[in-house]
Image: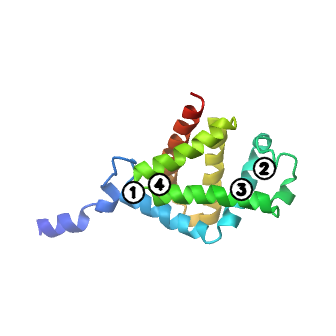
């Protein structure tokens, strides 16, 4: 009976097994990847939703984008250049999330992204503000599925991804 009880009531290895390279459990990775797959089904619309929300919440950050700084938000969603930029963001995030099990590849991808942004004068605060917007968009898209566990998985993942971008930003200033 003890063996059956310990098997039945033992926490899932998916929940407790932490990847030392990322700090994420297998379950957290699955939550992030499964929810990201839903956003990826219409990646341009998802990216546009994130970036227009970002500019709406932080209009000062729109000024950092020369192509978009003087455009009204209502026009941006239909701009092919803006859609292309949003698609690029979504692709970078997808590549990073696909590489959660290949941390060296993820690091290289995101550090290059950080170097590019650092050379353009982007600051960490802009990314931290973007994180808040991403979390808000995720909550609005997933509603009741945006549980504390879901939020924690995404919070930890974004922190991980942005820490790699920040390294690249620091390297671009060296």
What residue is shown at x 72% (from left), y 54% (from top)? 51
On the image, numbered disc 3 is attached to which residue? 85
Name the one closer to the observer, 141 or 78.
Answer: 78
Question: Mark 4–mark 2 contact, CB under 8 Å?
Answer: no
What residue is shown at x 33% (from left), y 51% (from top)? 18
Upstream in sequence: badge 3 or badge 1: 3
Mark 4–mark 2 Cα distance, whole angstroms, equals 26 Å
Callout 1: few (<14), some (14-19), or many (20+) C-alpha neighbours within 10 Å? some
Asked if residue 166 is positioned above or below residue 86 in the image, the reply reads above
Mark 3–mark 1 Cα distance, whole angstroms, equals 26 Å
On the image, numbered disc 1 is attached to which residue? 101
What residue is shown at x 65% (from left), y 47% (from top)? 130
Upstream in sequence: badge 4 or badge 2: 2
Callout 3: few (<14), some (14-19), or many (20+) C-alpha neighbours within 10 Å? some
Name the one closer to the observer, 130 or 66.
Answer: 66
Q: What x and y, as percent, mark residue 59?
A: 79, 44
Question: On residue 153, which mark appears?
Answer: 4
Question: On residue 44, which mark appears?
Answer: none
Asked if residue 157 is positioned above or below residue 140 in the image, the reply reads above
Q: Is residue 156 visible?
A: no
Q: Is mark 3 on a helix, strand or loop?
A: helix
Asked if residue 101 is positioned above or below residue 64 in the image, the reply reads below
Upstream in sequence: badge 2 or badge 3: 2
């Amino acid at each position: 009976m003890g063996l059956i009880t310990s098997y039945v009531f033992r926490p899932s290895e998916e929940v407790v097994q932490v990847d030392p390279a990322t700090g994420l459990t297998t379950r957290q990775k699955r939550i992030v990847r499964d929810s990201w797959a839903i956003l990826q089904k219409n990646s341009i619309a998802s990216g546009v939703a994130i970036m227009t929300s970002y500019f709406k919440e932080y209009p000062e950050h729109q000024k950092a984008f020369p192509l978009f700084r003087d455009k009204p938000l209502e026009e941006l969603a239909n701009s092919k250049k803006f859609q292309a930029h949003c698609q690029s963001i979504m692709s970078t995030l997808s590549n990073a999330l696909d590489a959660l099990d290949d941390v060296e590849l993820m690091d290289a991808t995101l550090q290059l992204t950080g170097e590019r942004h650092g050379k353009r004068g982007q600051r960490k605060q802009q990314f931290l503000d973007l994180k808040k917007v991403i979390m808000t968009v995720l909550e609005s898209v997933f509603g009741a599925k945006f549980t504390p566990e879901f939020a924690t998985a995404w919070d930890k993942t974004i922190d991980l991804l942005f820490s790699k971008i920040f390294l690249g930003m620091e390297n671009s200033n060296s």
